[in-house]
């Protein structure tokens, strides 16, 4: 269960140097935020930030932006970054945004994002909530507005019904499934260079297969 009500979380985030505010002003200007022309990769629903922190450390030539809706979850990532900063190990190519993913086109301009990561997203199991799933056709429309022509969406989950929905929805949205697997950790090709999230480590240790797809246009 996600934590949503930690006293002081909102205030800490509002004043933190690793969190980007006034996002509409940053739209089409992320190169100014990072001070370079490097590609921008984003994770939608980043949770506590472990995945992006490792990715940023491994790939200094790429800029990363983590997007999280809940203050109390983002707070954990902010605290980890401050701990790394105190040890002089905080990656300079990583920033966070607290926002609803439905507002992505307000934060990023056309072709401004080169890759989108969706890791262990909320399955929203009730059918009436299908459009809230991050792999719904409604969200693919949003990704289409910000993703570069050769950009891709990478999705990982341990939820089989959500994965099957995502495979179908990707094609219904007019996108192409470039690669997919029903057992990531036993797929030598797709698992090469894989960086695990906290959920991925937890679920795979329980024997759950991890599903992954890569989609482009």
Image (cartoon, rainbow, N blue to C red):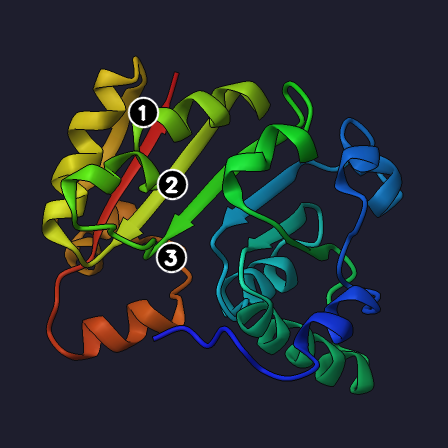
Seen at 41% across and 55% down, the residue is: 193
164 horizontally vs 43: left or right? left
Where residue 129 appears, x then y in whole percent?
25, 41
**C-beta proximity under 8 Å, tags 1 and 2:** no
Select label 3 or label 2 by which is in front. Answer: 2
Where residue 199 appears, x then y in whole percent?
32, 70
User: Which residue lies under the disc numbered 2?
Assistant: 154
Closer to us: 13 or 7? 7
Seen at 21% across and 60% down, the residue is: 185
User: Which residue lies under the disc numbered 3?
Assistant: 194
106 horizontally vs 158: left or right? right
Label 2: how many Cα within 10 Å (few below 14, some 14–19, many 20+): some
Q: Earlier in the sequence, mark 3 or mark 2?
A: 2
Label 3: how many Cα within 10 Å (few below 14, some 14–19, many 20+): few
Select label 1 or label 3 by which is in front. Answer: 1
Residue 98, compared with residue 15, is above or below; it is above
In the figure, residue 217 lies in which quadrant?
A: top left
Label 1, secondary structure: give it.
helix
Q: Is residue 51 visible?
A: yes
Measured Cα–Cα span from mark 1 to mark 3: 26 Å
User: Which residue lies under the disc numbered 1?
Assistant: 137
Label 3, secondary structure: give it.
loop
């Amino acid at each position: 269960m996600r934590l949503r009500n930690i006293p002081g979380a909102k205030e800490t985030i509002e004043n933190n140097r690793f969190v980007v505010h006034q996002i509409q002003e940053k739209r089409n200007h992320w190169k100014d935020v990072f001070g370079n022309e490097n590609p921008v990769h984003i994770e939608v629903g980043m949770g506590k930030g472990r995945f992006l922190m490792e990715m940023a450390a491994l790939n200094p030539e790429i800029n990363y932006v983590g997007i999280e809706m809940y203050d109390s979850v983002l707070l954990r990532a902010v605290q980890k970054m401050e701990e790394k900063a105190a040890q002089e190990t905080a990656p300079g190519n990583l920033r966070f945004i607290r926002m609803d993913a439905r507002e992505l086109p307000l934060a990023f301009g056309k072709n401004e994002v080169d890759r989108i990561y969706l890791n262990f997203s909320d399955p929203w199991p009730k059918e009436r909530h299908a459009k809230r799933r991050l792999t719904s056709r409604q969200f693919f429309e949003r990704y289409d507005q910000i993703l570069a022509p050769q950009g891709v969406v990478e999705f990982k989950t341990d939820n089989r019904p959500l994965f099957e929905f995502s495979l179908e929805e990707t094609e219904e949205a007019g996108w192409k499934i470039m690669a997919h697997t029903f057992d990531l950790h036993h797929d030598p090709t797709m698992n090469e260079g894989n960086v695990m999230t906290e959920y991925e480590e937890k679920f795979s240790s329980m024997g759950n297969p991890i599903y992954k797809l890569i989609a482009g246009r």
